[in-house]
Image: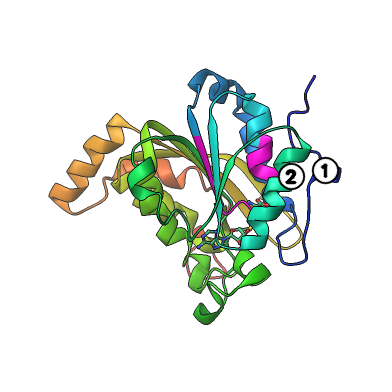
Amino acid sequence: MSPRTAQIRLVSSHREVYEPCDDSFALVDALLADQANLLRHQPKLCLELGCGSGYVITSLALILGKEGHYIATDINPHAVRVTQETLEAHGVHAELINTNIASGLETRLAGLVDVIVVNPPYVPTPEDEVGREGIASAWAGGENGRAVIDKILPVADNLLSEKGWLYMVTLSENNPSEICLQMREKGYASRILVQRLTDEESLQIIKFWRDFDSQLEEKEMAENKTVPSRVMESLLSQFPRMPFLRGNNSNSS
Ligand SMILES: C[S@@+](CC[C@H](N)C(=O)[O-])C[C@H]1O[C@@H](n2cnc3c(N)ncnc32)[C@H](O)[C@@H]1O
């Protein structure tokens, strides 16, 4: 039986390329947890933004079988080469493109991608660290770690098909409830598939999908210029124990 995720010993590496870490493992765990849905979904086109070592796109291809077409991008040219080696070591194929997010692919892929996976650079850093060459681009996320995430969201909205799903890694400092609300305004429902507390980070893997109810809510929000309380309640109920929801008073519990 073929392995369901990329084997770490076969994942290629380079000193300037992000090695699979807790965030990469959490993303693949979320894909595995959603495997039955993914198989039923029968995605024709899957895309990873920021593929690094290739661990995630290779795992996705192994989880889904060899059906469908896979594309992966990275701004770091070394990452594209390393991903090619990782894919080959596992006998799967993806089209690899060295580009900024999905620049140059907007027209070709608009409305066609059934699954997007992304583990973005999410670490809060000074803004001038964002977009630096090499390994620094793997984590530098600017203020609140949102510089690249906020560019990815509209791109994903443009590329996803009607039935498209987005799986994205966030850190609590990225204010994930606000990200879910922003996506709600674009007509997406969301759910946290995996939450992981490591020594240094509180991570979430969030799945987004287009949702008829939230498209109605989007209209309601636009007309009334407020977020309906039921929307806010359902979003907040997903983030019950996260420090960023406790407000500014550090004594509140
Ligand atoms: C946290 S690493 C994740 C790597 C891999 N997906 C994983 O989960 O192990 C983020 C990746 O995004 C890439 N990246 C950063 N900014 C990017 C951008 N604007 N466009 C494309 N890729 C980007 C980095 O080079 C890095 O490989």
Left or right, 182 with respect to 149, comes to: left
Q: Are marks 1 and 2 in contact (CB under 8 Å)?
A: yes
Q: Judge whether residue 54 is colored magenta.
A: yes
Kind of residue at disc 2: Thr
Q: Count residues near mark 2 (Cα–Cα under 10 Å), then give few for <14, some for 14-19, many for 20+.
A: many
Residue 54 image offset from top left, x and y in percent: 68, 47
Report the front residue among 91 and 114. 91
Work out whether 220 lies above or below 154: above
Give SS at disc 2: helix
Q: Which residues are magenta?
A: 46-59
Task: Indicate which disc residue 86 carries.
Answer: 2
Disc 1 beta carbon < 8 A from ligand 1? no
Asked if residue 132 can be seen in this view, the reply is yes
Residue 101 image offset from top left, x and y in percent: 47, 57
Report the front residue among 227 and 150. 150
Residue 83 image offset from top left, x and y in percent: 68, 49
Kind of residue at disc 1: Leu
Residue plotted at (80% across, 19% down):
1
Residue 13, picture quadrant:
bottom right
Give SS at disc 1: helix
Residue plotted at (59% across, 49% down):
204
Asked if residue 54 can be seen in this view, the reply is no
Q: Which residue is mark 1?
A: 10
The colour scheme used to paint the residues is: rainbow
Residue 220 image offset from top left, x and y in percent: 18, 43
